[in-house]
Amino acid sequence: MKFGTKAVHAGVKPDPTTGAIMTPIYQTSTYVQESPAKHKGYAYARGANPTRDALQASIAALEGGKFGLCFSSGMGATDAVIRLLSPGDEVITSNDLYGGSYRMFRRIYERFGIKFHFLDLTHSENIIPYVNEKTKLLWLETPTNPLMNIVDIAACVEIAKEHDIRVAVDNTFASPYLQNPLSLGADIVMHSVTKYLGGHSDVIMGALVTNDENLYRELAFILNSCGAVPGPQDCFLVLRGIKTLHLRMERHCANGREIAQYLKQHPKVGKVYWPGFEDHPNHDVARRQMRDFGGMISFTVKDDNQEKAIKLMESVKVFSLAESLGGVESLINHPASMTHASVPREDRIKSGLVDSLIRLSVGIEDIEDLLADLDQAFQKI
Ligand SMILES: *Cc1c(COP(=O)(O)O)cnc(C)c1O
């Protein structure tokens, strides 16, 4: 099956009782058993729920994987992967990571004796000097937030496999429509389902997908033992959202392309970060591992003028000033004071995350309205 057909159908079967075409919201905490321990695969809803099962099968299919697991948030899903490790283990990851992942690694798991190396992974060979017998996990994210750096997943996997290191990829920014890390050799794909998969800015959820049955069993054991499960209502909303994922992504990409080009030629704009530009440092890798370039774009205001950047963000009317991304509505965000406020200014500036940097999550509105909105906002600065 092709992607769009999977988005509509995978994991979803008519309800066995009524034939309802949409999977019902099984709003229940427990299931009646015929005799002690004799049941239909459902005993208690932390362990399993049919609405969640349908969603897990759907997300697994979209990633080309056999096994899916859903969590109460993207961070809950990441947490489960780190819980596979033991004190003394080491992790290699990017120095340009989602802020929440960085915070969890540094502030929670370093206390448990796990060591994290934060490296520039846009050059995969940077991994090599940090590998030793304690290295158990390579945690990748691509494209990165907010500078849209691209990591070569297949090249990193090749190095990791030589040393028996597991590879997990945070695929949130790309969505399964644009990129499938399992097909590039990764062991685990993680999603903040909150973003493109849910797509409607109404749910917090996470997911993991793998092809490895033993790994799946370990992760399912962690999910049930530690308990970060999503509720059935949220699973239903995401099942519904996924049915239009391919259509939404086509429009996110088309709008993103137009806005990236508009910004690039704008006299009041400094740099534009979007992997679709031929002069993006890893454009060739993005071309190879992604189907298109997505709707996430960052840019700076000329001369890094923060005052003008803030004025611009206050002046937009169709774009909304908000954190998060991947929903149908266009959002504008100021990483330095919003999503990345916890990163010390010096470190921020060093990595290119300057004071006037603005991040756009381009939605699926009509492009004429989005461009007109940016135009009127630029006229005010
Ligand atoms: C939002 C996000 C997360 C965290 O997901 P939550 O659903 O907010 O817990 C992780 N990684 C990336 C890249 C994200 O954008």
Image: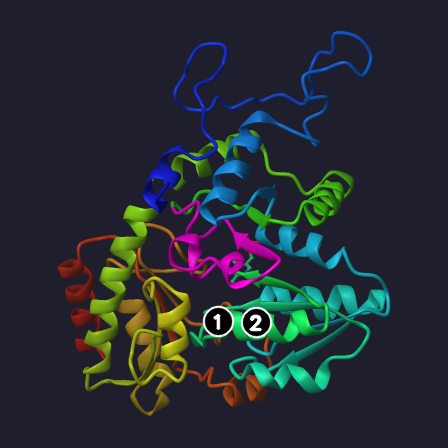
Residue 280 visible within the image: yes
261 sits left or right of 284 in the view = left
Task: Give the amino acid type for the residue marked by disc 2 in the picture.
Answer: Leu
Neighbour tally class for label 2: few under 14, some 14-19, many 20 plus, Cα within 10 Å: many
Mark 1–mark 2 CB contact (< 8 Å): yes
Residue drawn at (32%, 70%), measured in percent from left and top?
Answer: 313
Provide the secondary structure element on which disc 2 rests.
loop
- Residue 185 highlighted magenta (yes or no): yes
| Residue range highlighted in magenta | 172-199
Q: From the viewer's side, name the closer residue of 317 and 218.
A: 218
| Image quadrant containing the C terminus | bottom left
Residue drawn at (55%, 61%), measured in percent from left and top?
Answer: 170
Task: Give the amino acid type for the residue marked by disc 1 in the picture.
Answer: Thr
| Residue 133: image location, x then y, percent | 81, 75
Q: Give the quadrant of residue 303.
A: bottom left
| Image quadrant containing the N terminus | top left
Q: CA distance from mark 1 to mark 2?
A: 7 Å
How is the structure coloured here?
A: rainbow
Pointer 2 residue Cβ closer than 8 Å to ligand 1: no
Q: Which residue is mark 2?
A: 97
Q: From the viewer's side, name the closer residue of 187 and 142.
A: 187
Residue drawn at (58%, 68%), measured in percent from left and top?
Answer: 140
Q: Which residue is mark 1?
A: 144
| Residue 22: image location, x then y, percent | 41, 24
Q: From the viewer's side, name the closer residue of 172 and 151.
A: 151
Is 272 placed above or below 26 here? Answer: below
- Residue 182 highlighted magenta (yes or no): yes
